[in-house]
Amino acid sequence: MAENSKSVLLPVMAAAVFAGLGRMVFQKIKADRRARENRTAGPVDEKTRQWISEVVRTPRQ
């Protein structure tokens, strides 16, 4: 009978996947913190900018 050799590929691939996911989560956390500090929500198109201006300028009743 042939010996059962333990493959190293699967644990290495699993470690690489978890490291990649961890890195993505870390980058997302950093981006969220930067956005919160700068109070930016992202790029706003002209139509949305006009709508925001109208909502802010219109007095509430």
Image (tube, rainbow, N blue to C red):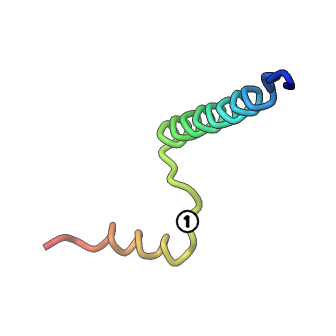
Between 4 and 56, the one nearer to me in the picture: 4
Res. 8 image quadrant: top right
Tell me if mark 1 has few (under 14), some (14-19) or many (20+) residues whose alpha carbon lies within 10 angstroms of its own. Answer: few
Type of the residue with mark 1 = Val
For mark 1, give the secondary structure.
Answer: loop
Q: Position of residue 46 (x, y in %)?
A: 56, 74
Q: Residue furthest front?
A: 1
Which one is nearer the viewer's eye here, 5 or 54?
Answer: 5
In-front residue for pair 24/2: 2
Quadrant of the snapshot with the C terminus: bottom left
- Residue 59 left/right relative to 12: left
Number of numbered discs overlaid on the protein picture: 1
Q: Quadrant of residue 4?
A: top right
Point 85% across, 25% down: residue: 1
**Picture residue at 47% right of the left edge, 40% below the top:** 36
Q: Height in image: 27 above or below 54?
A: above
- Residue that protrudes farthest toward the left in the picture: 61
Point 50% across, 53% down: residue: 41
> Residue 40 at x, y = what percent?
51, 49
Position of residue 57 measured from the top left corner of the image (x, y, whole percent): 32, 70
Q: Residue at x 41, y 69 (%)?
A: 52
Residue 16 occupies quadrant = top right
On screen, 40 above or below 47?
above
Residue 15 drawn at (x, y percent): 70, 27
Q: Nearer the viewer, residue 1 or 4?
A: 1
Left of 9 or right of it: where is 37? left
- Residue carrying label 1: 44
Most extreme residue toward the bottom is 47
Question: Is 17 rendered above or below residue 61?
Answer: above
